[in-house]
Amino acid sequence: MNALAATNRNFRHAARILGLDSKLEKSLLIPFREIKVECTIPKDDGTLVSYVGFRVQHDNSRGPMKGGIRYHPEVDPDEVNALAQLMTWKTAVADIPYGGAKGGIGCTPKDLSKSEWERLTRVFTQKIHDLIGVNMDVPAPDMGTNAQTMAWILDEYSKFHGYSPAIVTGKPIDLGGSLGREAATGRGVVYATEALLAEHGKSIKDLTFVIQGFGNVGSWAARLIHERGGKVVAVSDITGAVKNPNGIDIQSLLNHKEATGSLNNFDGGDAMDPNELLIEDCDVLIPCALGGVLNRENAGKVRAKFIIEAANHPTDPEADEILSKKGVIVLPDIYANSGGVTVSYFEWVQNIQGFMWDEEKVNKELHRYMTRAFGNIKNMCQTHNCSLRMGAFTLGVNRVARATVLRGWEA
Ligand code: NAD
């Protein structure tokens, strides 16, 4: 099941639980606006090349729309649509005053030189500059984009609208980025994990963890779990996988990856088959890489007791059912990885205030938001006798539905 079908299915299930009016349900599902633009740039050799860029703005009833921009060869309108919708529910679950959006350009970033990458970003910004805005739609980095990409968008947008640091989040600190933003998603994952485990009378220091993906989210989650005394027994990335039943020294693995560019030949553990990683024995499994990795084929073999969805959409609905029957507790993506967008919100607030917070304040506020959202999700689970995923979806959908109704339907 693709990401859009799965997201729509979860939304519809939540709408049924909430007893939403069918017209409201339909209105919440259809995106506010879908943008498709053609971006032609001269390559470094002078030839022209064209790319297609998308921005789907799903809902703005609770505030400006918010979501990443990804550069990836497989960016397609359906996936962007699903991810935009997920952002709407995610920002509502976090209770930050935003709606949801997502965008992307179908391109292969590694085939672009830095100047081609910059030209493409500037052309894309020129095409959408009047449809984004500090109070309308605020992009952020996603797969294939980074703080530098946001700096170019900020610069290009400011040519049309004047100095506007709050137009993007995930910027370099020198241009108004927030301290703590780089670690925020991984840190939020760890705060969310602590909240869930506490509810089950457990704590990170007593448990074993397996982490798929060792990029921004996975490496920060691993580092913070290790710091708290948790045993990370296996880690994988695109280059391979490593395991050590006594616990991997995460700082050594980070140093090894920095030095060699891969997880292979790490002397603090044994190489393992990356395909076995998700079914490795552990207490907590944290997918931090791709969508759809837990599916009908492998869900029955998962040995973890808890799954924390740090990646977007790592569990397809069939796997969800299998895991639920096995008694595996799944903490859903729209909550578990919301630390990134929450600190993006803090960045936007700081830009609007013209006042920079210290990192301690950022992390303290993030902890407060993540803990509060977990309590709100649990209340929905109790009210509707449902899973954590449906607790999160009903919480998010209900908040957006209430805002939509309060704003009224009159034309
Ligand atoms: P990233 O590009 O920094 O890291 C991705 C990691 O996944 C890399 O280590 C890569 O090697 C690994 N990977 C890729 N294919 C793999 C495979 N087949 N098997 C094992 N590992 C593989 O990306 P990121 O920012 O860490 O994002 C990871 C996930 O978290 C994505 O699903 C993303 O949408 C989601 N997410 C990220 C943020 C954020 O703020 N960065 C926020 C919310 C959600």
Image (cartoon, rainbow, N blue to C red):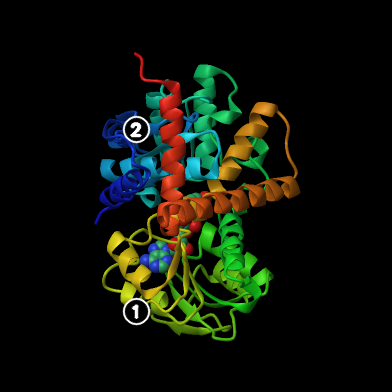
The C terminus lies in which quarter of the figure?
A: top left
The N terminus lies in which quarter of the figure?
A: bottom left
**Which residue carries the number 1 mark?**
301
Q: What residue type is labelled 1?
A: Lys
Residue at figure coordinates x 60%, y 29% from the top left: 165
Can residue 83 be seen here? The reply is yes
In percent of width and height, residue 352 lies at: 64, 27
Q: Which residue lies furthest to the top in this view?
A: 411
Can residue 147 be seen here? The reply is no
* Front: mark 2 or 1: 1
Determine the image quadrant of residue 104: top left
Which label belongs to residue 41?
Answer: 2
- Quarter of the image where ligand 1 sits: bottom left
Look at the numbered disc 1 and give the secondary structure of its residue: helix
Q: Is residue 185 above or below residue 355?
A: below
Q: Is residue 250 above or below residue 349?
A: below
Look at the numbered disc 2 and give the secondary structure of its residue: strand
In percent of width and height, residue 127 lies at: 37, 25
Q: Which of 88 and 83 is in front in this view?
A: 88
Mark with earlier residue (2, 1):
2
Residue at figure coordinates x 34%, y 43% from the top left: 15
Q: What residue type is labelled 2?
A: Ile
Residue at figure coordinates x 27%, y 31% from the top left: 23
Contact between marks 2 and 1 (CB within 8 A): the answer is: no
Determine the image quadrant of residue 76: top left
Q: Distance between the residues labelled 2 and 1?
A: 48 Å
Q: Is residue 115 above or below residue 353?
A: below
- Answer with left or right where residue 258 lies relative to residue 79: right
In percent of width and height, residue 164 lies at: 58, 25
